[in-house]
Image: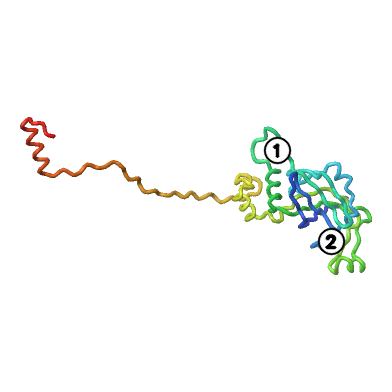
Amino acid sequence: MNSMIVKALAAEVSATAKGFTATITAETLDRDGEVLIPQGMNSREFDQNPVLFWNHDYAKPVGKCVGLKRGERAIVGEFTFAKKPDGYVGEFFPEVAAALVGQGIVNAVSVGYVPESGGVRRATDIDRKKYGDEVQTIFSRWKLLEVSLAPLQANPDALITAVKKGLVSPVAAKQFFGVEAPKRTVVTIELPAARSTVAKPAPISVAEIARREIARARGSIYL
C-alpha cells in the first residue's frame, strides 16, 4: 500500500450545538499543486470506524464523524465531540478541542488518504485550463483513511487568549499544548484607616489638676 498522504485544508468549519461541520476536501488547487477529486473518494473503510483525531495523533481521538455529504465539487462532514465519561477526573481533551473549535481558534481540518490504483495522473493541458497553471497532480481515485482537526491557528498567543477567556484552563494549556499561561497579577489596595466616631475628652488644665490633688489630700470629694 502507498504511504498515507496528509492534506491540510483551511476548511470552512462551522460550530453547531452538537459539534461542527466542515468541508473536508474540495475540487480546488491546494498549496502543493494537487487536486483531490471529491467524486473519487472511497470511504468504505473510514465509514466503519469514523474517528476524528487531533492533528493526526492517533493517541488523541476527540470525536467521530456522523455523516459525509458528497457534493459535486466538495465533501462536507458532520462531527460530534466525545463526551466526558461519568466519574472521569481531570482535564478531558475532547472538551478542550471543542472549546477551541467553537470559538474559531482552530478552524481547519486535514484528511489522511492513499491513492487507489489508476487514480493518480500528471496534470494535462485540460487540467491546467480548469485548475490553473500551477496544477501538477490529479488524484481522481483515493481512499479516505482518517480526518483530523488541524490546529494551524492554535499558536501560543491564541491559546493564551483562550485561557484568558476561560475557554481552556491553564492546566490544560500546559498539559496538552505545552503553553505556560501567564500568572494573574494580584493588586493590593491600601485603604485609609477609619476615623473613630467616639468623642475625645477635652484636655485638663494644670490649675484644674492642682485643685483636684489638694481636695483629694484634704479628704474632700471632688466633683
Question: Which colour style is shown?
Answer: rainbow
Residue at the extreme front = 223
**Image quarter for residue 196?**
top left
Observer-nearest residue: 56 or 208?
A: 208
Q: Amino acid at mark 1?
A: Lys
Q: Position of residue 191 (x, y in %)?
A: 39, 48
For this orientation, the residue located farthest to the top is 219
Label located before the other in sequence (1 or 2): 2
Dot 2: element: loop
The quadrant in which residue 73 appears is bottom right
Residues at circles 1 and 2 in contact by the CB criterion of under 8 Å:
no
Dot 1 lies on which element?
loop
Displayed quadrant of residue 135 = bottom right
Locate residue 40, reporting x and y percent: 91, 54
Residue 167 tag number: none
Horizontal side of 152 relative to 136 (left or right) equals left
Residue found 87% across the figure and 44% down from its top: 45
What residue is shown at x 64% (from left), y 52% (from top)?
A: 159
| Farthest residue, direction right | 118
The residue pinned by badge 1 equals 84
Rounded to the nearest angstrom, the CA distance separating label 1 from label 2 is 37 Å
Residue 190: give x, y in percent of width and height. Answer: 40, 49
Mark 2: few/some/many CA within 10 Å (<14, 14-19, 20+) = some
Left or right: 118 in relation to 195: right
Kind of residue indicated by mark 2 = Thr
At horizontal 86% and vertical 59% (from top left) the residue drawn is 27
Identity of the residue drawn at 6% across and 33% down: 217
Q: Quadrant of the C terminus?
A: top left
Could you tell me how many numbered marks the image carries? 2
Query: 186 or 178, which lies in front?
Result: 186
The residue that mark 2 highlights is 28
Residue in the foreground of this view, choosing between 25 and 67: 67
